[in-house]
Image: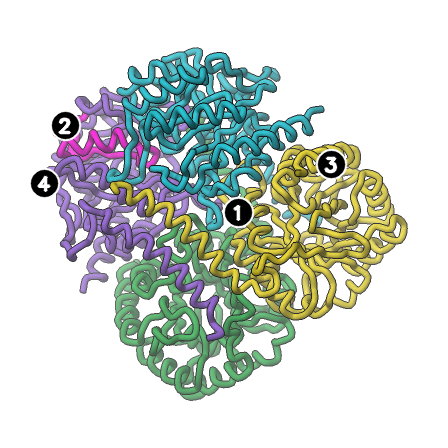
Chain colours: A yellow, B cyan, C green, D purple
Amino acid sequence: MNDMNNYGEKSCEMRKYMYVSEKEEQYRCCGRQQHREDIIVKTGSVKTGGGNFTMIAGPCSVESEEQIISIAKAVKAAGANLLRGGAFKPRTSPYDFQGLKAEGLRLLKLAKQETGLPIVSEIMGVNDLELFEDVDLLQVGARNMQNFDLLSELGKTGKPVLLKRGLGNTLNELLMSAEYIMSKGDTQVILCERGIRTFCEHTRNTLDLSAVPVLKELSCLPVIVDPSHATGYARLVPPMAMAAAACGADGLMIEVHNDPENALCDGPQALKPDEYLKLSDKISRIRKAIED
Amino acid sequence: MNDMNNYGEKSCEMRKYMYVSEKEEQYRCCGRQQHREDIIVKTGSVKTGGGNFTMIAGPCSVESEEQIISIAKAVKAAGANLLRGGAFKPRTSPYDFQGLKAEGLRLLKLAKQETGLPIVSEIMGVNDLELFEDVDLLQVGARNMQNFDLLSELGKTGKPVLLKRGLGNTLNELLMSAEYIMSKGDTQVILCERGIRTFCEHTRNTLDLSAVPVLKELSCLPVIVDPSHATGYARLVPPMAMAAAACGADGLMIEVHNDPENALCDGPQALKPDEYLKLSDKISRIRKAIED
Amino acid sequence: MNDMNNYGEKSCEMRKYMYVSEKEEQYRCCGRQQHREDIIVKTGSVKTGGGNFTMIAGPCSVESEEQIISIAKAVKAAGANLLRGGAFKPRTSPYDFQGLKAEGLRLLKLAKQETGLPIVSEIMGVNDLELFEDVDLLQVGARNMQNFDLLSELGKTGKPVLLKRGLGNTLNELLMSAEYIMSKGDTQVILCERGIRTFCEHTRNTLDLSAVPVLKELSCLPVIVDPSHATGYARLVPPMAMAAAACGADGLMIEVHNDPENALCDGPQALKPDEYLKLSDKISRIRKAIED
Amino acid sequence: MNDMNNYGEKSCEMRKYMYVSEKEEQYRCCGRQQHREDIIVKTGSVKTGGGNFTMIAGPCSVESEEQIISIAKAVKAAGANLLRGGAFKPRTSPYDFQGLKAEGLRLLKLAKQETGLPIVSEIMGVNDLELFEDVDLLQVGARNMQNFDLLSELGKTGKPVLLKRGLGNTLNELLMSAEYIMSKGDTQVILCERGIRTFCEHTRNTLDLSAVPVLKELSCLPVIVDPSHATGYARLVPPMAMAAAACGADGLMIEVHNDPENALCDGPQALKPDEYLKLSDKISRIRKAIED
C-alpha cells in the first residue's frame, strides 16, 4: 500500500480522538458509558437536556431595578424560560466596572419575583456562596473553568451549575472540570460552548460548534451555546444561534439589553428585545425541522 | 468613565472588525459596496448564491469507472446537483497516492455524461489547465489559496472557481485571493469554509461557521461549507452540515463514498449514499425553516 | 500610492500593537510610564529583575522528605537560588494525584531549612493562605491567571507573587492580572511565560518567547520563563532555556527530579540534577555574552 | 494507580510526539534514520549546517540599483554572507506592489557582482524558473509551502532551496514538503521558521523557536530563523535573533533597509545597517558561548 501517510494522517486523527475516548473511563459521573441516557438538569421548574430546550436571556450586567425588570419581562414575553444577569463581573481590568455584586443579586431576585423566571448568575469565589442562596443556577465563567477550588465547593451545594468552556481549553478539560463538580455530590451540570481563542480577527472569539455533537457523544450532560460572547457582535448572534440549534444544542444563552448603546458592559453583542423575539421564533422552527 | 478597559476591549474588537471593513474598498470585484446584490455563480445549469442552494457531493478521489459512476448516480438520486471527484490530489507526502490525474478526469467526465451532473475537481498547477477543459467548476484547494500565480491564471479562463479557505488564513486574505481571480477577467468565484487550524483535538480542523455570515456581509460571493474536511469524521458531518444551512450558507460540499472503509483517501469522513440521502432531506427542512 | 494593503497590513499590526500600548495608561502599578525603572522583586534574600537573574528549580511535586531534600541540595549545588515544589497540584482530573498539600508544604520548609533556599509553591485557593505563611514566593498557576478573587487576596499579603500566563491569554490580560494583585497593596509580581495553546503538535505547548521583550517593554516587572511546561520534554528544556536567557529573561523556572521515570507528575519534562548543572553553566555563559 | 489521567496526559503528549516520530520512516531523504549526519547545504561558496552559521540579510524588496547595492555593501560589511532581495512579491492583495520582477532580479545580480555575495530570492511560479538561472538559492515562501507543483519542479533544478514554514503548518508538513523537493533529485534544502498564526496580538506572527531543536532532531537539514517576519517589529528582531542562535539555529534571515520609513514593503520590521552590525556581533558572542 503506497498510501502510508494517508493512513498515518487518519490514524493520527483517530488516535487524537481515541485519546479523548480513552478518557471516557475517567468520565465517571458525566460519561456515556453503558449507553446511559441524557442527564436532565432541573433549574427550578425548567428542564434542560433530554429533548428539553432552554432559552436563557438577559443583560450582561444587572444595572438597575428598572433595567433588569423591564428586560426580564421582555425576554419572558419573547419565550425565554431562564433569566441571566451578571452581579459579580470578572473583568480583565481591576479598574473597570466590577458589577453591582450583592445589590445586583437583590435586583435579580426582584426580577425573578416579578416574572417567575428562575435566575442564573456568575459566582467568582467560594466565599460568596451565601449570597447566591436564592440563585437557581450557578454560573462558572470561562476564566474559572479550571478554578478547581471553586468547582469542588459548588459540587457540595447540590445546586445545578452552568459551566462555561475556557477560551483555551479542550473538551476533555471541560468534561474533567464537570467531574470536579459532580464527583463531590449529586450536583447537575450544564456545559456551555462560548467560543475559543484562535487567529481569527472577524469575531471576538471563534465559536466551535462541533463541540456540541462531540460533547453530547462523550457525556450525558446538556450542552448549550452562548453566541453573544462567541461572536461579540449582535448582528452575528442570530445566525450563530440558529446554527447551534441546528446541530443539536440543548439551549441558548443570549445577551439581551433594552439599550445596548448605553450598556455598562458588552453592549455591541446584545440583542434588543424585538430582535430576540424574532430570533426565538426562528429557533422554534429550526428545532421542529430537525426532529425525526 | 471608570470603564475604559471595557470600551478599550470593545473598541479593540471593533477596530479589528473595522480593519476588515476598511479593506472593503479593496474588495473591488467581490465587495458589498453600493449594496450590490448577490453574485449568482453559474456552473453549467446550476446556480449558486442569491437564494440558490447547491449540493456538491462525491468521493474524495476518483478511483475507478465503476466507483465514480455508481456514486454519481447515488448522490444525484439523493438530491446533489454537482458532482465532486479528486483527480489531482495534493497530499502532504510525495509517497502517498497522488490521484489518477488525467485518467481520473476522464472517468469523472464519463460520470458527467451518465448523470448529467456538472463536475468540480481540484487543479494544482497552471500547466494542467488544458486537462480541465471539460471540468465545469475549477477547485482551488486550501493549500493553494495564496498560490497567486495559479489564481491569476484561473482568472483568465472565465470559468467559475471554487476557492477554499486556507487552514491558517483570515477572511480578509480569502477575499483578497478572490480578487486575484476576479480582477483578471469576468470569472465568478464560490468561497468555501472548510475548517481552520486551532488547538482543538476533537476534530480534524475547527469549522469556523461565523465565516459564513461575515463573508456574505463583506462580499457578494456565494459561500459554501465543507463539513467533511472540517470535522474529519462522518458522524459529525450531518450536524455540522445542518448548522451551516441554518446560518445561511449557499451550499454544501460533502464527501460521499460507496465503500468508505476501503476508500483510498479520507474514508473516515465520507458518508454512505443512504446517510447522504437522509441528510439532504434534513437540509431542505432547515432551509424552509429559516425562510422569512 | 498603489500599496494600500501593505500599509493596511502594517497599520493593522501597528493598530493591534497600539491597542496594547494604549492600555499602558491602565498599567497603573506595573507600567513603563515616565520611563520608570525595573521593579526588583525580593524573595527572601534573592533579587529578581533589574539585572538580577533568578534560577528556580525543583520537582513538579513534593513527594517525600528524602526526595525534596536531595533535590534541593542538588539544585543548590548546581546554582539554583530558589527552590520550587508543588504541594497543591491543579490537575485536569479530580481522580489524579492532587499533591501532598499541607504535608507537602511542611516537607518543602524542611528543605528550605536544610539548604537555605527560599521556596516557591502554587496556591490554589484563598482559604489556604495560612498554610503558605512560610512560603517565600506565592505562585499563581496558568489556570488561575484570571481567578480575580485569588489575585485580589494575594495582593493584600504583601508577599511576592509569581504569576504564570494562562495558556489562552494575551499579554494585556497577563498585565491586567498583575494589576489586580498590585493595586491591592505593595505586593511585587514576577511574570512567567510558560507556553500557549496553538495547533502545534511537537511540543506540549508553544513557548512564546517574544513575550519576554514585549512584557519588559510594557511593564517594569521581571519576566521569567518556564521551558519545562512549555515544551513538555526534558531534551527540549536546555535549548529553550538558553533561548530565554538570550532574549532577556530575568530568570528560569525549571523542573528537576532525581528519578524522572518514577515521578508522580510530569516526569518526561524533568531534568536530572547533572543535566541541570550542565545547563546552568551554559546559561551563565550566554548571560555574559549578551552583556553590553 | 490513581494517576491515570496524569499518564493519560503524558501519553497523549508522547503519542502526539510519537506520531511525528513514526513519520520518520517517511522522511526518506531528510530524516535522521541511521543517525545520519547533518546535511551541509552549499550556496555558492557559502555552507549552511553542520556547524556552519549563515547570515542572510537584505531588503524585503529590491527597489532600485542604488538601494540594493548600498544595502548589499552594508550588510556584507556587517558580516552577512548571503544577500536577500525580493523581486516577485507574494502580496495578499493584487492591487499592491508586486515587486520589480525580472528587473528586480537583474538589479540583484548587479549587487552580487559588486559584492560577491551569493543571492537568494523568492520564486512564485514554475514558469519563472528561467529568470532565476543566476539566483544561487531559490526561496519558497510560506504561502507556497504546500504548492506541490512548484516544489517538484524545484527539486529537478539541483539548486539549493530555502523552504519557509507556512503560517498554519505543522513540522511534519514542513518536512514532507522538503521530501517533495528532495525526492525529485539531489537538491538540498534549508528549512526556515518564520512564525505561525496564533491568537497573540503583540507580534505579527508567533515565533515557534522550539521548531529549531525538533526539526534538527527529526531531520538532517539545516534550520534557519527569520525574526523579521515572525515579529513584524524591528525592535523585536535582535532579541529574537539572539534567542534563535542560542537554541541552535544554523542561520538567520534578517531584513535590512537603508531607509525603513520609506520602504515599499514591510519597513516597520527592517533593521538599519548599523543596528544589523551591532546585532551580528551579539550573535557571534552567543554562538561562542554555546559551543561545547
Q: Are marks 4 and 2 in contact (CB under 8 Å)?
A: no
Q: Amino acid at mark 3?
A: Ser
Quarter-wise, where is residue D253 in the image? Answer: top left
What residue is shown with label 4? D45
Mark nearest the camera among 1 and 4 is 1
Disc 4 crowd, CA 10 A, few/some/many (<14, 14-19, 20+) = few
Q: Which residues are magenta?
A: D132-159
Viewer-nearest residue: B262 or C39? B262
Q: Determine whether the residue tagged by mark 4 lies in a helix, strand or loop.
A: loop
Mark nearest the camera among 2 and 3 is 3
What residue is shown with label 1? A197
Please check whether the numbered discs 2 and 3 fall on a single chain.
no
What residue is shown with label 2? D134
Gap between marks 1 and 2 measured at Cα? 45 Å
Q: Residue at x 67, y 67 (%)?
A: A155
Q: Residue at x 65, y 56 (%)?
A: A37
**Chain letter, disc 3 residue:** A
Looking at the picture, does residue D234 appear above or below residue D258? below
Disc 2 crowd, CA 10 A, few/some/many (<14, 14-19, 20+) = some
Mark nearest the camera among 1 and 3 is 3
Gap between marks 1 and 4 measured at Cα? 46 Å
Looking at the picture, does residue D221 appear above or below residue B53? below
**Chain letter, disc 1 residue:** A
